[in-house]
Image (cartoon, rainbow, N blue to C red):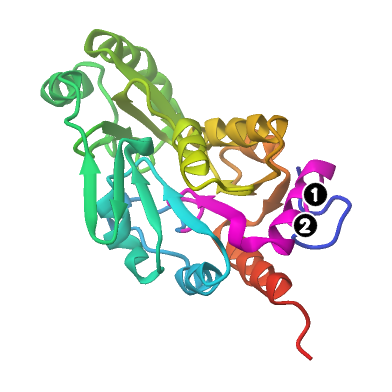
Amino acid sequence: MSPTEAGPPHEPDTEAGRAALKALVSAPSTALAGFDFDGTLAPIVADPRASAPQPGVVEALTTLSAWLGTITVITGRAAATAVRLGGLDRVPGIVVLGHYGAERWVDGRVMAADPPPGVALVRAELPRLIDAVGAPDGTWIEDKGRSLAVHTRRAADPDRALELLAGPLADLAARADLQVEPGRRVIELRPQGVDKGAALTALVEERAARCVLYAGDDLGDLPAFRAVADLREQGVPGVTVCSSSDEVTEVAEAADLTVPGPPGLTAFLDGLTARIRGPVV
């Protein structure tokens, strides 16, 4: 949904979203707020190893953490990597779920099971596959430890490069019993049975949250949006926020509220804290 549609700035366009935001503001200590990292808390960059949080966003989360019951980041990255790149350890009590929920970082410790053997198979075969299909210059492999991603953002025609790679990567994922996760000029091969929706739902249940907010920007965030919708049906108010881009329109279409990228999300968080605090007397 467009941020220019009916409603004041940072006000959801849907009735369910407005009701959930009102519930969060009225009882923040019972709420859980979840966030994607790349494209949501941090601008997308050509080299994800150089990613950095949007200026002011970690400070906004730190301030908000004094009011909310739980703040979590759910990312496709390794949990420790997101913490290091984002300086997320500055946010008191934050829970960082890495690799779509397969890893959990809390208070400096990472808990995770061993990756399935298919990850090692892909790690061994992926370089040869990239060469065999004639992937253009600028295509490169990111090894995340528990998954591998092929990026085309640096290629002269990144969308055409993705089209060239999609079929062979799907075949390799099938042989390795891994899942294909498309994204913003990237295709990731990762273990089955984990996604951001399952991770979000499990944490909501664990923390007995009575209201939930989730913000994301990419296709991998849609399972979390669907989880929010399912939680609504169970009586838990929920609101979804899209950190918008021109590359992935499906996320904006599914969201209750759309903000203009990480800068817009930072402003939204500052405004949310102001609403929770109430008017200064």
Left or right: where does residue 220 sit relative to residue 130? right
Confirm whether residue 138 shows in the render: yes
Residue 151 covered by magenta stretch: no
Q: Residue at x 14, y 19 (%)?
A: 121
Q: Residue at x 78, y 82 (%)?
A: 279
Q: Which mark is residue 22?
A: 2
Tell me how far mark 1 sits from mark 2, CA to CA. Answer: 5 Å
Label 1 crowding class (10 Å Cα cut-off): few <14, some 14-19, many 20+? some
Q: Which residue is mark 1?
A: 19
Q: Residue at x 60, y 56 (%)?
A: 30
Question: Which element is circle 1 on?
Answer: helix
Q: Which residues are magenta?
A: 12-41
Residue 34 covered by magenta stretch: yes
Q: Quadrant of the N terminus?
A: top right
Residue 70 in the image: state x and y as whole percent. Answer: 50, 57
Location of residue 32 with respect to 133 vertically, above or below: below
Q: Are marks 1 and 2 in contact (CB under 8 Å)?
A: yes
Question: Which element is circle 2 on?
Answer: helix
Residue 87 in the image: state x and y as whole percent. Answer: 33, 67
The kind of residue on which mark 1 rests is: Ala
The kind of residue on which mark 2 rests is: Lys
**Rendered image quadrant of residue 187:** top left
- Tally the numbered discs: 2
Residue 206 in the image: state x and y as whole percent. Answer: 46, 42
Tell which residue pokes out farthest to the right in this image: 6
